[in-house]
Amino acid sequence: MAQVLKATVRANIQEAALRCFAGQGYGGTSMADIAAAAGTAPANLYRYYPSKEALFDAVVPADLARRHDFLLDTRIAALAEGSAREAATAAELLDFWLEHRLAMIVLLDKAVDTRFAAYPAAFVERLVAHAADALDGAPPPPHDEILHLVFDNTRKAIARILATGADREHTGALIAAFWSYQLPGLRGLMAYINADLKNRAEGVDELVGLRREVG
């Protein structure tokens, strides 16, 4: 007789796997670790998933990054435009983070050795690209460097908040507080970079004018 796989057991295994992957990373997690966290025997675990890779694929979906990128882009576009959708897009992104809390920790901070290994750096590059689009010119090396640093810290902060939030209300409050600190700081940084770009452009114009006079 074929063995019957129980939905409740599968869900328990998946939750245990997510906790392990988010806490220890993929490479630091064994099937035995997951079985122990799920309160079941390793042999029983393999009845549901033939490998750690198959289990990871089940709990961190292949399209997770694509869906997150879409919500992130939508949120940033609303901020840049001063759109009436600003509050709604913030709520949608926050809801996504909370709904996929452990998977997002993996995606943002524990993705080594998985199909998402390049995602943390890609997340930072995506935010830097959005910032560059909003500037009055391409940021020169010093400013590009600080943008990368700021957005890498953003990545780490979001992952840390998702990891430490006690419940949905607490985590949401932490995220809201983080945004209240980050957004004004980003606006100040962008204004500073734009002012520097303007000064550099004016300096070039003056230099060109002097060369014409000398010539």
Image (cartoon, rainbow, N blue to C red):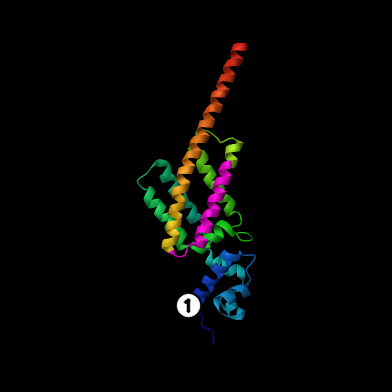
Quadrant of the rendered structure where residue 171 is? bottom left
Q: Give the x, y percent position of residue 55.
A: 57, 70
Image quarter where the C terminus lies is top right
Magenta-drawn stretch contains 156: yes
From the viewer's side, name the closer residue of 3 and 114: 114
- Name the quadrant of the N terminus: bottom right
User: Residue 118 colored magenta?
Assistant: no
Judge whether 191 appears above or below 169 on screen. above
Outermost bottom residue? 1
SS for callout 1: helix
Q: Main secondary structure of the magenta part?
A: helix
Please tell me whether residue 125 is drawn above or below residue 211 in the rendered image: below
Nearer to me, 69 or 174: 174
Q: How many marks?
A: 1
* Residue 133 makes an appearance in the image: no
Depth check: give the residue in front, 144 or 1: 144
Residue 205 visible in this rendered orientation of the protein? yes
Question: Residue 4, position in %: x, y?
Answer: 51, 83
Q: Which residues are magenta?
A: 146-167
Q: In the image, 112: left or right of 61?
A: right
> Where is mark 1, residue-wise?
8
* Residue 182 on image: x %, y %: 48, 47
Q: Is residue 160 above or below residue 47?
A: above
Amino acid type of the residue that numbered disc 1 sits on in the rendered structure: Thr
Residue in view at x 59 percent, y 20 percent:
207
Q: Residue at x 51, y 78 (%)?
A: 9
In this view, the residue farthest toward the left is: 84
Question: How busy is the neighbourhood of tag 1: few (under 14 within 10 Å), some, or many (20 plus)?
Answer: few
Residue 88 horizontal/vertical position (percent): 37, 52
Up-down: is 29 above or below 40?
Answer: above
Residue in the picture at 44% in, 53% down:
177
Residue displayed at 63% across by 71% down:
30
